[in-house]
Image (cartoon, coloured by chain):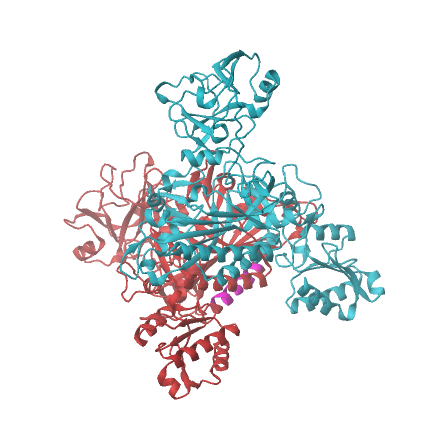
Chain colours: A red, B cyan
Amino acid sequence: MKLEKLVGDRYKERPADCAIDSHALMIRGGYMKYVANGIFSSYMPLKRITRKIEQIIREEMDKIDGQEVMFPVVLPASLWEESGRYESVDNSLVRFLDRNKNPHVLGMTHEEAAVQLVREYGQSYVKYPFMIYQIQTKFRDEARPRGGLIRVREFTMKDAYSFHTSQEDLNNYYEKCFKAYEKIFARVGIPETISVAADSGMMGGDISHEFMLLTPVGEDSIAICGECGYRANVDAADSITENIRDDISNDLELVHTPDVTTIEDLCGFLKVKKEKTCKAVVYQRNIDDSFIILFIRGDLEVNETKLTNYLKCDIHPAAVIEHSGLCAGYIGAHNLDNPNDKFTVLFDKSLEGTNNLVCGGNKTEYHYTGFDVSRDANIKNIEYNDFAKIADGGICPECKKKTISISRGIEVGNIFQLGRKYTESMGMQYLDNNGQSHCPIMGCYGIGVGRLAASVCEAHHDENGPIWPMAIAPWQVHLCAVRSDDEQVKSIADNLYDGLMQNGVEVIYDDRNVSAGIMFSDADLIGVPLRVIISPRNIKENCCEITSRDKKLSFKHSLESCKDKIIETVKNM
Amino acid sequence: MKLEKLVGDRYKERPADCAIDSHALMIRGGYMKYVANGIFSSYMPLKRITRKIEQIIREEMDKIDGQEVMFPVVLPASLWEESGRYESVDNSLVRFLDRNKNPHVLGMTHEEAAVQLVREYGQSYVKYPFMIYQIQTKFRDEARPRGGLIRVREFTMKDAYSFHTSQEDLNNYYEKCFKAYEKIFARVGIPETISVAADSGMMGGDISHEFMLLTPVGEDSIAICGECGYRANVDAADSITENIRDDISNDLELVHTPDVTTIEDLCGFLKVKKEKTCKAVVYQRNIDDSFIILFIRGDLEVNETKLTNYLKCDIHPAAVIEHSGLCAGYIGAHNLDNPNDKFTVLFDKSLEGTNNLVCGGNKTEYHYTGFDVSRDANIKNIEYNDFAKIADGGICPECKKKTISISRGIEVGNIFQLGRKYTESMGMQYLDNNGQSHCPIMGCYGIGVGRLAASVCEAHHDENGPIWPMAIAPWQVHLCAVRSDDEQVKSIADNLYDGLMQNGVEVIYDDRNVSAGIMFSDADLIGVPLRVIISPRNIKENCCEITSRDKKLSFKHSLESCKDKIIETVKNM
């Protein structure tokens, strides 16, 4: 491919609207173009990268007996009604009517389609286990697309679905797929990817893992124990607190706390530690705006995923609570006015058994001191659940030491044990060897292709451009003919280009009559791992210059044997 | 791949709802499954076939300097508003609102997306020509999906877009792409595909061709001249008639024609030939149900595509014409009551200059005889246009002989010269070498991948299954271990399977303990071109049996060297 003919513009300047480097570089380098919010077109270099990633994924899926299939992008609503998700999934699921007014959806995940495809095939136990997968476009109407290809609305995904007759068999396959994922991430150039325990969210099922590329720009938070190796998405990490109960419980006392509305203000005003406060965090259900009041220790933050999972519905932070009957900023668990139980009142387990706390007085500018949860929280049927976010320095749920650190990561893949959620709801059954009927157990396994490409870029770049690993680089060799107006340069470079191509090397060839500066900055943006420079000066020394994009290699080689040397170097990278 | 593990059911019986063989066989053979009207999922064998077809298309597109890119499936309505197609395309274009109430469409073709991607890149003449293409899912909400993969709503398509600075350059590229298409159809196994002149429909532009696989089950009609080689879709073929004018024009006379409503009845009743009648065909505009009355010679049929193109709007045959003021069944061009020109009245050129015709009397049960169009059709501003369908035995528009025959065909590809329709409406401009601004000229080039697979099946099958050409077959070799419970059979077949796989041969291996009958009928349905049979009887003769699915090959070969013989045979097929 001649660079001169490559469709797409390259830019010197970082675009203003790019928060992360991979996004900026993939716009600057002519990899993709914005079409609409969270929707991009790809130019040839990105298409070549994603095709190589797809091929690596395909090979690893085939090695664990995956069968590549293809599900539709557009699915009839009836399939999603069978599983119950037509109702339960929020408006990230695009719903529309076709010309005959039949409701359809755009596939954002394909559990329903997978069950539909194999429901008849899988009627006997002898057919199990099996795994089917596809690499296909999906659409998820994200509220806040961001970070270029990191969080988009339209994306290409490999999604795989396995079917089993026993939990042990699923466990074995899950383990196999886990290892295949490790191989995939290593092969595309980010072997540093780690797996973490995850929350299953709308997918259902119990056990799930995410594969995370740790990076400060990641949008997920991960709890890692430096001691025992425990790793989990904070959404899935148990928050463990030491609940301290003073020997003596003071009397409850209503105190005037003027102009004090935050926990910080309160602690300063009353000279107490945050750990000795009980704060109320208020949410509303999306469906009817009804209120949820969650009491939690003042130093902890609410994990909304845990809260959502507990409530089994979508929520948002309460916006306006005037006219609600709640005393905003001063809500407390003693004598809370809750007529007809119109508020859902919840307690985080960090409060269980604690005393001598400060909490809201349910009266503007007043707080209680001496609050003893078990003595004073006069609320019906109190139970304590884990709604808190695990914090940096917190207690490891595994080894119980205070060794948790919080890192940021990009989720590049996930695997779920789905159980029978879809096979039961959709009536998929098999007969076992005794003629008994059962619903099979499923696993599902996803990798976003575009996000993976962006993650590799995030992990491997410098300020001048991406540094693509050889396995997924858009081309293997970037050949620069510096001073292509020099006949000798042009003819030697042309010959080398032809020779490399004939040997199956993928070459992007820059024979434009432009300065070496422009040539090299374009080459940096395209990020091809091996660069070969033919120039009048090199020719005088009867050699070409070979360097690697990551600067680890840099040497000259004689023109006579440079073709073979390049082929060999590509193979070794 | 072991056949035992292949997901998908195979059926002996032809499904009731399959009108054409390829549809029936692809359901029977476990290639695909119905999901919704015009929407299918693919099992592994079909996925492997379409991937091979895609790779052949990709190679040929790359050879003519195509750059593979990727456009979104979901496009913002604003792009289609720029070209005017958001309004002009009927409800085959799926329109929906996203969560923020912004209108979007599902891409059914990507001219707008292509212009959007290269609008900035193509600002200088030095960048031209260039071609970009993608292989991607599309959705077209067809009113009547049918024929399995022949006419679906969701499909995978290769769509290519070329950009040029002159008509000559487009002509050259169009010719190149034409040849690339011929290569593609030859490589996938249907070299008999022919090209025909086509109507450009909603794409715009003047010159276009379709590539047709001739088959009685095709849904397109093609006019072919046996004499000069003229070939065109009937939608694009000029209808030429000999308009005979009798020397003497009889007087116009209103005659009673009781119970006569069809042209056939009328001709029988009055003892005239159809050619001597003038029939009225009535349509309504979709947009407002306003009437169009088309007068045409009684023996000819209306070509609705020509009529639609002339009217520049979508139409449908008039349903009920009561209360319209029209006298259904007896509409004529003499003294037609058309207050305020509320009806659009059109004349086919077959009527120009003709006389002594029978036509409707605009009065129930009455017709005129002696109708002379130029004398009696008292209608304002009559012009004669070509609205007729070219007929079998008709006159060739090229050599003017009565040599036209009509064949049926499946359209497997199309190429269009688009002109400046999209670049003008979307404001894409380049500066020429004199600094003058112009809109580039475009071409576009489509191939439906699934339809191509079905077409190959339609062209190559027998009653037992598809006969896939080696280039696109799901596997290259179908290995049958007949009596796999025989240890020797099993071990020889296992070894051969491993040996072939190690040599890169794609093998589907049937080592199930089932009868040879079941084995062979499954093999017929899977349609792999080369079959190898290991059986106790063959082993006694120290050989294996090698046959081809198309029955052209059938021989025995010694077990010692059969692996090499198979590899060689695969290469030669």
Outermost residue on the left side: it is: A258
Q: Which quadrant of the view contains residue A341?
A: top left
**Horizontal relation, residue B404 to residue A492: left or right:** right
Outermost residue on the front side: it is: B247
Locate residue B133, reporting x and y percent. Answer: 45, 56
Locate residue B440, reporting x and y percent. Answer: 35, 54
Can the viewer see residue A101?
no
**Horizontal relation, residue A6 to residue B558: left or right:** left
Locate residue A15, reporting x and y percent. Answer: 28, 61
**Horizontal relation, residue A37 to residue B478: left or right:** left
Residue B423 within the magenta-colored segment of the rendering: no
- Between B373 and B35, the one lying in front of the other is B373
- Between B191 and B476, the one lying in front of the other is B191
Compared to residue B492, the image places residue B354 above or below, namely: above
- Between B244 and A434, the one lying in front of the other is B244
Span highlighted in magenta in the image: A173-185
Locate residue B505, reporting x and y percent. Answer: 65, 65
Magenta stretch secondary structure, dominant:
helix
Can the viewer see residue A540?
yes
Quarter placement of the N terminus of chain A: bottom left
Residue A184 within the magenta-colored segment of the rendering: yes
